[in-house]
């Protein structure tokens, strides 16, 4: 497929109530930079039902143009309906590239869309840029178990498609609402939708841990020494109003649930403050937290690799340093 423009598209996933999911707004941040470098418009594509709030959200967060497909059949995600709508739009407008969130739905949608359009897809990206020589998007993603970062180009096919992990980029600042809104009246014949959602069963007692939305995270690793070691981590988190995170080692030991895991096979986070306690700083952990604004590392080993990414480092034992920090914070709050 030939591109008709240098525009860069960002898919804005919507919730069932028509509001935008965070990822659709976050992606406007790298989207702006890439669109400017490509010399095209930044276009947000909103698909859902009763999407006015989502359209306003992306319009005030930097989109130059918003293309909207709003109809009851898009209230809930369906592979067939969403692929049909997006393929129709991409064929009609033929932008040069599109970013999709690497959410469960985005991971389902991206490969099917790329297959439908006969183009490539780079999945699960953690960094994006433009390759200076070719002008293609340089999609960066972890490879070989996170031991190296692969930079992937899609030189021969358009559009260039990629899914991008939630939490890697911060939402751009809100500003003026000056986007042009185009409404597309698109419907899918019912017989083309091969699956339907019969029932939503919510897991009872399943822990919900909002690491991706947290401003402050206090994480514990194998260095906490056992499940009871998370007591001092929780105390510090409570004092700071923070969310508790963990390394995979602590999760694998069964000291804390997987919902708390940060890293390549856990959540990617970007808080204002990340405090890593007893975490060595393996590349797979760093892959999930190194874009935090300020990183504080507490570790008894002065040579621990975590100190190479930390803004502040404290060499010492968790059992001494963490309660002392908590006491000081509580004192300052009082
Ligand atoms: C495919 C793959 C995916 C992975 N995905 C992830 C992932 O998503 N997230 C993740 O975290 N890991 C992941 N890992 C595992 C990763 O490689 C490391 O094994 C893991 O991060 C180590 O966890 P840790 O730092 O808690 O433990 P360790 O590496 O054992 O480090 C413990 C640290 O605690 C310090 N310490 C010990 N006692 C104390 C004390 N009393 N006070 C202060 N400090 C102390 C030690 O000096 C050490 O630095 C993955 C690995 C693979 C192969």
Image (cartoon, rainbow, N blue to C red):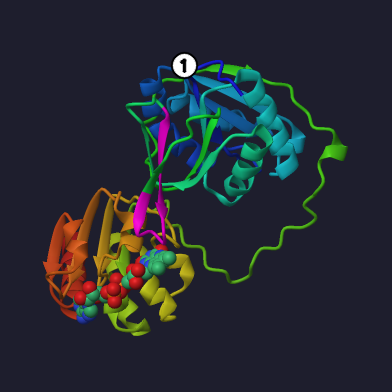
User: Which residue is painted at 12% across and 70% down in the image?
Assistant: 302
Residue placed furthest toward the front: 156
Q: Quadrant of residue 317?
A: bottom left
Q: Which residues are magenta?
A: 136-149
Q: Which residue is mark 1?
A: 178
Work out whether residue 268 can be spotted.
Answer: yes
Q: Would residue 331 be counted in the magenta stretch?
A: no
Q: Is residue 68 above or below residue 84?
A: above
Q: Is residue 4 above or below residue 220?
A: above
Q: Would residue 138 be counted in the magenta stretch?
A: yes
Asked if the residue at label 1 sits under 8 Å from ligand 1, the reply is no
Q: Tally the numbered discs.
A: 1
Work out whether residue 261 can be spotted.
Answer: no
Q: Tell me the chief SS of the magenta region.
A: strand
Give coordinates of residue 189: x percent, y percent. 84, 33
Give coordinates of residue 288: x percent, y percent. 36, 56
SS under mark 1: loop
User: Which residue is painted at 29% across and 65% down in the image?
Assistant: 282
Give coordinates of residue 48: x percent, y percent. 66, 35
Residue in the foreground of this view, choosing between 177 and 140: 140
Residue in the foreground of this view, choosing between 169 and 107: 107
């Amino acid at each position: 497929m030939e591109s008709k423009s240098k525009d860069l598209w960002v898919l804005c996933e919507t919730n069932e109530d028509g509001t935008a999911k965070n990822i659709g707004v976050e992606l406007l941040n790298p989207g702006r930079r890439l669109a400017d470098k490509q010399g095209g418009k930044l276009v947000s594509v909103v698909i859902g039902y009763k999407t006015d709030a989502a359209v306003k959200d992306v319009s005030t967060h930097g989109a130059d143009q918003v293309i909207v497909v709003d109809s009851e059949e898009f209230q809930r995600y369906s592979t067939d309906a969403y692929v049909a709508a997006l393929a129709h739009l991409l064929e009609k407008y033929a932008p040069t590239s599109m970013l999709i969130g690497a959410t469960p739905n985005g991971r389902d949608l991206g490969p099917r869309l790329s297959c439908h359009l006969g183009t490539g897809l780079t999945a699960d990206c953690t960094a994006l840029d433009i390759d200076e020589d070719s002008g293609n998007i340089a999609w960066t993603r972890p490879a070989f178990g996170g031991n190296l970062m692969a930079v992937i180009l899609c030189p021969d096919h358009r559009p260039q498609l990629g899914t991008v992990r939630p939490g890697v980029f911060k939402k751009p600042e809100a500003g003026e609402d000056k986007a042009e809104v185009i409404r597309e009246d698109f419907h899918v014949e019912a017989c083309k939708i091969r699956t339907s959602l019969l029932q939503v069963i919510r897991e009872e007692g399943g822990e919900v841990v909002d690491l991706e939305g947290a401003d402050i995270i206090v994480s514990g690793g194998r260095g906490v020494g056992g499940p009871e070691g998370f007591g001092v981590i929780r105390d510090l988190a409570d004092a700071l109003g923070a969310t508790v995170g963990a390394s995979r080692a602590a999760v694998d030991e069964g000291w804390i649930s997987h919902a708390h895991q940060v890293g390549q096979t856990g959540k990617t986070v970007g808080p204002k403050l990340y405090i890593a306690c007893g975490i060595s700083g393996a590349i797979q952990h760093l892959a999930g937290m190194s874009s935090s604004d300020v990183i504080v590392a507490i570790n008894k080993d002065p040579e621990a690799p975590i100190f190479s990414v930390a803004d502040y480092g404290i060499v010492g034992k968790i059992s001494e340093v963490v309660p002392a920090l908590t006491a000081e914070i509580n004192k300052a709050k009082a």
